[in-house]
Amino acid sequence: MERFFKYTLTALISIVALMEFYQVLMRYVFEIPVMGLEEVLVYPTLWLYFLGSVNASREDTQIKANVLDVFLKTDRAKLIVRVIADVMSLIVVLWLTYWAWDYFRYALRVWKESPTLYIPTFYAECAFFIGLLLMTVYAVWYLFKNTKELLTMPKGV
């Protein structure tokens, strides 16, 4: 799974950077507008954003404000706070995934197309639901992992 994210995210960020470079080069150096490039750029950008978020969830490397860890003395207390944070994260991501599911169904039903190139926008819009669904899976996994660790931890630690 790590290799998938490593190569996919590298490819996506490279595509976005090259497309932006091409757009700037053509527009400001050669003064030739490239019609529709912004429409195409939405697809790798949205997938990059959501797959990057999924990867951060997988690695458990999201930005956190672990202020309480400074004040808590025991590993058990820190783990209790982590489990509470995992529960809150799961609630939020489930709520967002529910909204993304509604939007996914709407996008599938309406089947919009981009204004210039007539590319179905569904392929970019489905990144919302797929990304949040995968983040939900990782939130559940870390909740179970940390809860299991808390329940098996000796009381005095």
Image (tube, grey):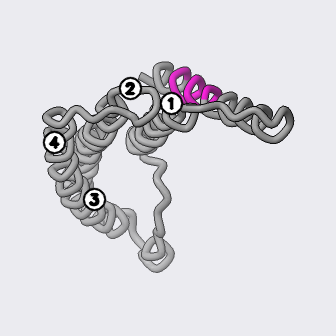
Q: CA distance from mark 2 to mark 4?
A: 17 Å
Between marks 1 and 3 in the image, the one whose residue lies nearer the viewer: 1
> In the picture, residue 69 is in which quadrant?
bottom left
User: SS of the residue at dot 1?
Assistant: helix
User: SS of the residue at dot 2?
Assistant: loop
Q: CA distance from mark 1 to mark 2?
A: 8 Å
User: Which residue bears the numbered disc 1?
Assistant: 40
Which residues are the magenta region? Answer: 7-15
Of residue 63 and residue 81, the one placed in the foreground of this image is 63
Q: Is residue 10 above or below residue 74?
A: above
User: Which residue bears the numbered disc 2?
Assistant: 119
Which residue is outermost to the bottom? Answer: 71
Of residue 20 and residue 142, the one placed in the foreground of this image is 20
Q: Residue at x 38, y 26 (%)?
A: 119
User: SS of the residue at dot 4?
Assistant: helix
**Tags 4 and 1 in contact by the CB under 8 Å rule?**
no
**Tags 1 and 2 in contact by the CB under 8 Å rule?**
yes
